[in-house]
Image (cartoon, helix red, strand yellow):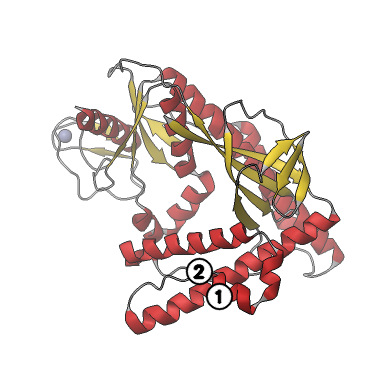
Amino acid sequence: MKTNRAYRFRLYPDKEQQLLFAKTFGCVRFVYNRLLEEKLAYYNENGKMLKNTPAHLKGKYEWLNEVDSLALANAQLHLQSAFRNFFRDKAVGFPKFKSKKHIRQSYTTNNQKGSIRIEGGRLKLPKSGFVRMKQHREIPDGHTIKSVTVSREASGRYYASILTEYEAEVPERALDLENSLGLDYSSPHFYTDSENNSADMPHFYRDAERKLAKEQRKLSGMVKGSSNYQKQKAKVALAHEKVRNSRLDWQHKESKRLADRYDLICVEDIDYRRMAQDLHLAKATYDNGFGRFRDLLAYKLAEKGKKLIVIDKWYPSSRECRFCGRVNEDLQLGQREWDCQCGAHLLRDHNAAINIRNRGLAMLA
Ligand SMILES: [Zn+2]
């Protein structure tokens, strides 16, 4: 089975490489925005999607040829898939223009016959050459690099997200249906499972969050634009980044723990539309990255010949009584427990997690 894996390492580009990165980020943004402009105009006139590529822009703006052409091609592909999402579901809204002020900048490029490779602790990239990299984890033999996303975070640090592909040997395994778990995404615990355990983020995470809040408060008391303000701003950005990194690290460990322990894990499909309607929830979800957690879980289970089952998003897992099947239409968003007409007393998240597990098992059968 062909499987993908992502690795993220810190990059240390020299001055010249930093300049080239900055230029590439700029060109990618430019191409994206120009193609979007064209698509918008065409859509307003014809109601259809224009298929355009960066080729004509390269003729007009010569400086576009100075950067990695695959980065530009990927900008077009990203835009195209954003547009397709829009056509599939107009509620997600039109793709947005990319702003220069966006704190995180990035571009994605692909490996073509070794144009990207790792050699002696450095990452070879098209146009940039060998960039110094801190590789804290080995990429196993048999992995081929498919693509790399180079990013510059708000703190000024550079990272490479390397996507690899490999042939995973999936062990034959008879799945034990009894050894299954349902997960209900719930803020602030991240998730509650069908055994009524909650995954609370560990202390280092909360400590980092407290520190972030403190630095943020300091920043808001400073004079905008002053040199102290700039210094503090970088400090806040770095604190943000540390929170993100430790969260990802924790998600790796947590998903591994679950994939080791269970044969089948059932989760809900993520309803982005409902989330968009509830901005608060959307933000919490985005921050916690449950979607990414599911991806990690999926491949860790798959490697062991186990299964992640995604149930449909319309299933009312929170509102259905797991004993009698009645659906409680009056259940409010913040309501943690409720009593069903059948006499059962239900804990919202626990009940939802059990329903998700049962639904998943039913889908399997
Ligand atoms: Zn009931």
Q: What type is the residue that disc 2 sits on?
A: Thr
User: What is the number of callouts on the image?
Assistant: 2
Q: Is residue 279 left or right of residue 6?
A: left
- Residue 235 seen in render: yes
Q: Is residue 184 left or right of residue 65?
A: left
Q: Is residue 49 left or right of residue 31?
A: left
Judged from the image, the secondary structure of the residue bearing numbered disc 2 is loop
Dot label at residue 53: 2
Please rate how many residues cluster around mark 1, counting C-alpha atoms within 10 Å: few if below 14, some from 14 to 19, many from 20: few
Provide residue 160's location: percent of width, then percent of height.
67, 45
Q: What type is the residue that disc 1 sits on?
A: His
Residue at image position (40%, 80%) is 42
Q: Quadrant of residue 349?
A: top left
Could you give the CA–CA distance between mark 2 and mark 1, rounded to whole angstroms?
Answer: 7 Å
Residue at image position (57%, 35%) is 144
Provide residue 48's location: percent of width, then percent of height.
34, 74
When the figure is inspected, residue 149 is found, relative to residue 176, above or below; the finding is below
Query: Which residue reaches farthest bottom?
Result: 45
Provide residue 112's location: percent of width, then percent of height.
60, 47
Is the residue at mark 2 in contact range of ligand 1, meaning its CB lies under 8 Å from it?
Answer: no
Compare residues 69 and 149 and report the one nearer the observer. Answer: 69
Mark 2 and mark 1 residues within 8 Å of each other at the beta carbon: yes
When the figure is inspected, residue 33 is found, relative to residue 158, above or below; the finding is below
Compare residues 319 and 259 and report the one nearer the observer. Answer: 259
Query: Which residue reaches farthest front?
Result: 113
Residue tagged 1: 56
Provide residue 150's location: percent of width, then percent of height.
66, 51
Ligand 1 positioned in quadrant: top left
Q: Is residue 258 left or right of residue 312?
A: right
Residue at image position (46%, 42%) is 290
Quadrant of the frame with the C terminus: top left
